[in-house]
Amino acid sequence: MSDNVTLFPNILQPATALKAYAPIGVKFWENQETALDGLKEFADGWFARRRKSTQAALEAAKQIGEAATPSDVFREYQNWLTRAMELLAEDGNAYQQQLLKAGANLSARPEAPQTDERRTG
């Protein structure tokens, strides 16, 4: 009979463990939400830069088509290439910032679960 009395607290232990680890699960999903927000921000920026790049290429194509001399063609091409490289550098910077944010979220330690263990002697 004394075995039944000591087994009863052990039956409740899994529920206690789940409550102790619940904050870790919550933190996991909060981190997922943060990651998705960061990826959306990165993707929106990437599409905005691609739109700028496409507009610059279209304008360069028009200017090259209207160029009177080979040096005008070269100048327009060089202007377009300069802008394209600037946008590529912005892509790299945005990607680096995204990785730094992700790394900061990964390195943040979740709170350790606090358990109230009582043992009988």
Image (spheres, rainbow, N blue to C red):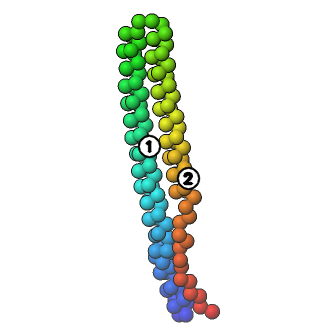
> Which amino acid, by three-letter code, is at mark 2?
Gly
Q: x, y percentage for residue 43?
A: 42, 40
Residue 5 in the image, given as x and y percentages of width and height:
51, 91
For the point 48% across and 7% down, the residue is 70
Residue indicated by mark 2: 103
Q: Residue at x 44, y 65 (%)?
A: 26
In front here: 63 or 17? Answer: 63
Q: Please state which of residues 87 and 111 is positioned toward the viewer in this rendering.
A: 87
Residue 121: give x, y in percent of width and height: 63, 92
Q: Is residue 69 above or below residue 32?
A: above
- Note whether 36 is above or below 121 in the view shown: above
Is residue 116 among what the camera can see? yes
In the rendered structure, which disc, 1 or 2, sits on the residue that comes first in sequence?
1
Residue occupying the point 47% across, 60% down: 28
Mark 2, residues whose alpha carbon is within 10 Å: few (<14), some, or many (≥20)? Answer: few
User: Which residue in the rendered view is the most extreme toward the top?
Assistant: 69
**Location of residue 98 with respect to 48 vertically, above or below:** below
Q: Position of residue 97 (x, y in %)?
A: 51, 46
> Residue 80: which disc?
none
Residue under numbered circle 1: 42
Q: Amino acid at mark 1?
A: Phe
Find numbered disc 2 in the image and state the secondary structure of the residue it sits on. Answer: helix
Q: CA distance from mark 1 to mark 2?
A: 15 Å
Please count the marks in the image. 2
Q: Is residue 31 above or below residue 112?
A: above
Q: Residues within 10 Å of mark 1 (few under 14, many from 20)?
A: some
Q: Is residue 14 visible?
A: no
Give SS at disc 1. Answer: helix
